[in-house]
Image (cartoon, coloured by chain):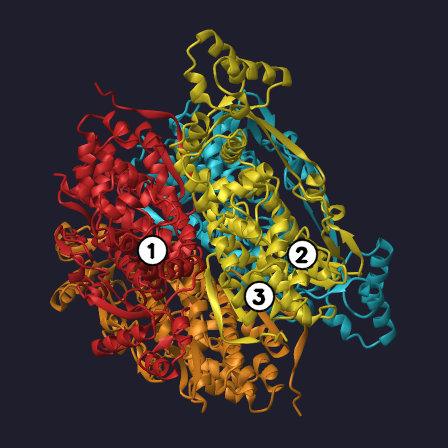
Chain colours: A orange, B cyan, C red, D yellow
Amino acid sequence: MAKEMGQLNEEKVFKDPVHRYIHVRDELIWRLIGTREFQRLRRIRQLGTTYLTFHGAEHSRFSHSLGVYEITRRIIEVFHKRPHWNEEERMLVLSAALLHDIGHGPFSHSFEKVFGVDHEDYTRAILLGETEVNEVLRMQGSDFPKKVAEVIEKTYHDKLVVSMISSQIDADRMDYLLRDAYFTGVSYGNFDLERILRVMRPMEDGAVIKASGMHAVEDYIMSRYQMYWQVYFHPVTRSAEVILSKILHRAKDLYQEGYTFKQDLTHFRSLFEGEITLEDYIKLDEGVMQYYFQIWLEEEDGILRDLCRRFLDRKLFKYSEMVSVSEVLKLSGYLEEAGIDPKYYLVIDSSSDLPYDFYRPGEKEERLPINLLKANGEVRELSRESDVVEAISGKRRTDHKLYYPADLIEKIDDSQLKRKIKHILKKDERDLR
Amino acid sequence: MAKEMGQLNEEKVFKDPVHRYIHVRDELIWRLIGTREFQRLRRIRQLGTTYLTFHGAEHSRFSHSLGVYEITRRIIEVFHKRPHWNEEERMLVLSAALLHDIGHGPFSHSFEKVFGVDHEDYTRAILLGETEVNEVLRMQGSDFPKKVAEVIEKTYHDKLVVSMISSQIDADRMDYLLRDAYFTGVSYGNFDLERILRVMRPMEDGAVIKASGMHAVEDYIMSRYQMYWQVYFHPVTRSAEVILSKILHRAKDLYQEGYTFKQDLTHFRSLFEGEITLEDYIKLDEGVMQYYFQIWLEEEDGILRDLCRRFLDRKLFKYSEMVSVSEVLKLSGYLEEAGIDPKYYLVIDSSSDLPYDFYRPGEKEERLPINLLKANGEVRELSRESDVVEAISGKRRTDHKLYYPADLIEKIDDSQLKRKIKHILKKDERDLR
Amino acid sequence: MAKEMGQLNEEKVFKDPVHRYIHVRDELIWRLIGTREFQRLRRIRQLGTTYLTFHGAEHSRFSHSLGVYEITRRIIEVFHKRPHWNEEERMLVLSAALLHDIGHGPFSHSFEKVFGVDHEDYTRAILLGETEVNEVLRMQGSDFPKKVAEVIEKTYHDKLVVSMISSQIDADRMDYLLRDAYFTGVSYGNFDLERILRVMRPMEDGAVIKASGMHAVEDYIMSRYQMYWQVYFHPVTRSAEVILSKILHRAKDLYQEGYTFKQDLTHFRSLFEGEITLEDYIKLDEGVMQYYFQIWLEEEDGILRDLCRRFLDRKLFKYSEMVSVSEVLKLSGYLEEAGIDPKYYLVIDSSSDLPYDFYRPGEKEERLPINLLKANGEVRELSRESDVVEAISGKRRTDHKLYYPADLIEKIDDSQLKRKIKHILKKDERDLR
Amino acid sequence: MAKEMGQLNEEKVFKDPVHRYIHVRDELIWRLIGTREFQRLRRIRQLGTTYLTFHGAEHSRFSHSLGVYEITRRIIEVFHKRPHWNEEERMLVLSAALLHDIGHGPFSHSFEKVFGVDHEDYTRAILLGETEVNEVLRMQGSDFPKKVAEVIEKTYHDKLVVSMISSQIDADRMDYLLRDAYFTGVSYGNFDLERILRVMRPMEDGAVIKASGMHAVEDYIMSRYQMYWQVYFHPVTRSAEVILSKILHRAKDLYQEGYTFKQDLTHFRSLFEGEITLEDYIKLDEGVMQYYFQIWLEEEDGILRDLCRRFLDRKLFKYSEMVSVSEVLKLSGYLEEAGIDPKYYLVIDSSSDLPYDFYRPGEKEERLPINLLKANGEVRELSRESDVVEAISGKRRTDHKLYYPADLIEKIDDSQLKRKIKHILKKDERDLR
């Protein structure tokens, strides 16, 4: 029979640059942090390739996960004294907060697209499979791992609990905005966390915000809006992401064509075969990925070599504001003519942004909106009260860019061909950075 | 004939959380940053294993190097208007500032000890060998790479130039204190950089500090003193370092004993053979190291497997304040008796600190002291004027600790043996963190 | 013949919490700071009665004026290397920046309304009259004081010069947002000043912003919007302002009714007579005002005594969201019936906000809009490019509140009368703070 | 029968730039803040004349008092869960923290010296006399005011309670270092408050510090040391203080000589007579003082006029490093000869500093030292463990300076006399700032 864990003899703290200290009083949390699956998050960067644009953005999902836990802990402290809050669910929401990103792989964005996997499946697998995380969670109760998975998957019956880590203003978003702003050094991500915590009120369907705190929430939404445009969608970051995808594509293509790699592919073989196990997945991290990029510098295949070199040495693609479809087709033809394979060297990348909306970009499920609690007890959705939020609400702005290797184009011998290519691109060429 | 490079058409900036912006106006600097050897510094952490104690400390030598460059650039701005400063040497000192750490390998501290290499040799090799860095430097003049090497090695004839990046108060130290404080989140490393820059004056033998700025310099020295004790010598960090060393030791020992590794050792073979080439050295980074730790989890050898597991999953050794030599010997015998190899599982680690002294710990060469320029023109060494600095000057404080695997000891079957071991250790056992 | 002043032998600096240091290199600026009219700004708070809501907001117009000067100095540094900038006008714009608030009186807002004066007239008078400021300015050229006045009054021929201290994004606004945020402790006023300075470009009709910096400007506009609602229009501050106005009204009314004050009115007599001299005006500051409030605590007149007590001891009026006109009239009647003079004890106060518009609230003159300079050379007004700014642009939001003395109402003996009064008010009564 | 007050229905908060928020949950504290005697602290600056050196230092004793309350509240939170802490004394220590400076007058330092009064007497008088503060305190119990006075006077029987606001590391010192650093903008006053709170432990004779937190305390002591030299003893501030003293001296001398002031002296008469009442004392604040300085600009007496002008317009005395006694006597004679009264125009000012000692400068009573609690339970005084603290402990550094009116000396007609005066002074003349 599982025996619930209690309080630590002495509170443990982690020094954290964003929240000053992260406080751990529960043995369960302390043990979860010590598991190999959680420690592995130290080897996966929070912002993927962003460090190639903002050199400070080298922080890991490990520190973000601790931060989400800490904010959740503080929300609970605020809610604790109030009705509607079920004390027994405290451990549940804290665990879910800490583990919400446990399934992420290295450079998830590109990785998942190329290999057709989904980190949410791995989150579930890590929570419920044969892992140290599962072992610790089960000590709390045999159905506890399942409940944690439900909270993270937003299917748990208590919406308030779910909303604390998955809503338009949850602990996850609040931590990443503050943290990403801190590590990149941009000032945009700052908002008054303490004020927002003070005006949050628990209700059955999720937390609401006292209307007197509306401006603090507007400020938070604007931070998100600014961070998307300034940091998350930065074209240089996307250029690095494009190259990363193309490396994985090329390696996979080569594998499927029967190409013989010089060095054994241990970690990648099952991926290329499309049948990766949980154990293999957990072993993957950014160190391992970069190791392969390093050894692929020695491969026979010129394209793979070139792309790896670009990623490791930050020789990125340049970009152009999108040109017309017909021109892209023309470009593609010209590049082929010049011996540059457009499959890997001409990429249209789109980013879109929904800084405040009921649906989050890229997600299928509904996101809980932000509701304001007015003095008279009425509850109103934020964008109906705020002009600023209304202005950016529900608008999907898409930004298309065309990425290409300016250096290779420069080296094309056929001067007429080169001129034609550059004529199309030069309309809006700009240097990276 | 090399043609000197000039100014960029438009200033480039890097957003930096410590200095707000890093400004690059010179083409030479811009190109050096773009070299593969410099980009590689992104894959080497500034503080080695410290991230296992302070989770924010995930920043790389890349960002530190940019920071040292930026502070140097600002010092030059201050000195520029004044005599004694040779304008032609501006590029020299900027390049040296940027490249002073270019030879660092992954987890240098342990790495260098185990393999008997020295990053300073690799710095020289990268500056003067067949590298992209060398190629860029040579554009400035054929003897320019050599001059940069001399500045970094402190043999350059102009002491003022040398002192800007190698003295008791140089751009290197000033950046790392501020940066390490920022990323760990501790407040101790802060001091008033702007004030110090304002009171620096160039003199033939190095920069001096106007006596009216003495208190700002005291504050800087105290920051250094505090950072050493709070961060750099933290026993948990040292525990991780101890394990790292033992991994490398074990792998090397196995190799030398003719053990067959399951996976090819590409990167490590030449290291184990003691004949590593520059090209191989450059390929090594922390991602590669961690890749090997990952695959060694599958090795036959139990010790190697266990140590790698400890490092990756942060199952560190615990520590005890040093016990007597005779007790260490006893412990060693007991462990052996219990089947725990003391060669890898019982480690005495010492750290020492010289927060302000004419000689820096671990270095053979002289360090220029900090001199104050008094209103009457007299120059006086800092510790003669400041009680506080005098109090911590020249004192080498050594802190010995004994590291051991508490979990393995706990599992010893022979209860009497276990009791004897714990009796020696318990005198001052304490949990990590 | 006036002799122009030059550079100081050694740069002077002021330690400033907002800009770190304020740098003064020009003798003219140094001397202007030393004049009695400028030093007087130390005795006038930047935010009037706001310190009664945000206790940190005790900073003076002196520190703000230095801040505006410093930002202007930095803008000039950015513009300096570029065309369109007339070097000879540097001193002009720096002087105008420093002196733009020189005419402000104590608690200007209420003060000017009650006594029908305008600080802009006094600014002009101080620049052109027999003052130390005028004496220093004239050393620069006999028409220099007049030119400075023209820049401040926005009639100077060179629009770029005017725009630096009077536009929708000028040194004045940028300093006060940052400074007021710093001293109140709210986080809303922060934006990336350094980034904005980097993207400013001088053009004939005023500074423009490179389009790539649009988001930084959006952030600045949002800061302004937030500061208005969170700080500048705070209802508690307005309650204090209401009481202040009523004190001045009552004293003036008494004077005009021939009431005999116990203590001589030196400073106020000429004000009450409506013929205040420049010399008298300059002597007025917040210390003097509060002195009178102190001695008026001893006056015969109960209303004056009560209002002064309220202001000094922060026994403010409470407020209600606006009720209908007919209810206000009813309330007024009830209060009169209860012996509470509604002339002084029932106040409707409105605030309005134009966070971004071509016209500033309360000003007659045009304000230069913010223009973006696109990559193709086109210039576009900000709100046409930014949804967020467009959302809050040109909308005048008015917030009416009704202020009244809840404590006096509580003490009304006639319980039926009291009930009727409270019935109207209770609809939306709320405590201050 | 007094009825104890309870908790507020809703927590009140004050936005504070140093502690983010100041939380008030007890009705007693809320009411004390609302008293006229406490509100009066808004009109008395925390750092007296320091704003004439550091223009940001315009903050009042009001905000400092709230800060001391807040830190005390946090210490109690830490102590609460532990033995030795008497819950009933919570209100006592919070009240004492809030009111510890309640007796301070305007520019206390000079004021008390000239008029021979002591703010501690007035603190006692305000707590026990017929005041709003006393009325509120008595609601808590008839002997409660007396107990609060005892805590502030350090005679209360429970040493732990006393130590929280009066020891070498109490809430008072911790708030003023952080606050003064924030408002002046110097970085020196910062230390890790949160860390210190975490390592404080209550013991019978006062709080002790866990030895593992020694470095945080060293950092705090160094902050204090730096703030003394950089801010509190700044010679420009002392110059302003010197002038302030001389104004009060001159006015008192004139009064005693029977001089007729143009304007009535209401507030000052009883002071000059040496029989000031509590009521009169409370009315005095810095606004009132500056009012008199303003009107004394119109007095017949040239010395009084000149000194007031100097203070208001910041035309301060310059200073010289101390010259010998015989030279001071000579100078005095020369000045007299030149018609400059040395009684008011030649001032020797000494400052001394005891940054860490068992006895605080200027105080008669003992100060509790800082004790460290070692892992083995032993308690050791800080300076025995810390080289840095030992280095600055118990050393009284005195800094003598000679202040004089350089401008008046410059105007002396007798060129030989002037030369002799300047010869003595020029040895070490330096400009203010």
Query: Dot 1 surroundings within 10 Å: few (below 14), some, or many (20 or more)?
Result: many
Q: Chain of mark 3?
A: D
Q: In the rendered structure, are the residues bearing label 3 and label 1 in contact, judged by CB atoms less than 8 Å apart?
A: no
Residue at the image position 34 percent from the left and 61 percent from the top: C243
- The picture places residue A128, in percent across and down from the top left corner, at 53, 86
**Residue bearing the label numbered 3:** D135
Query: Dot 3 surroundings within 10 Å: few (below 14), some, or many (20 or more)?
Result: some
Q: CA distance from mark 2 to mark 1?
A: 36 Å
Q: Quadrant of residue C81?
A: top left
Q: Chain of mark 2?
A: D
- The picture places residue D77, in percent across and down from the top left corner, at 62, 68
**Residue bearing the label numbered 1:** C191
Q: Identity of the amino acid at label 3?
A: Glu
For numbered disc 3, what is the local secondary structure? helix
- Asked if residue D294 lies left or right of residue B230, the reply is left
Q: CA distance from mark 3 to mark 1?
A: 46 Å
Query: Dot 2 surroundings within 10 Å: few (below 14), some, or many (20 or more)?
Result: some
- Asked if residue C315 lies left or right of residue B408, the reply is left
**Residue bearing the label numbered 2:** D213
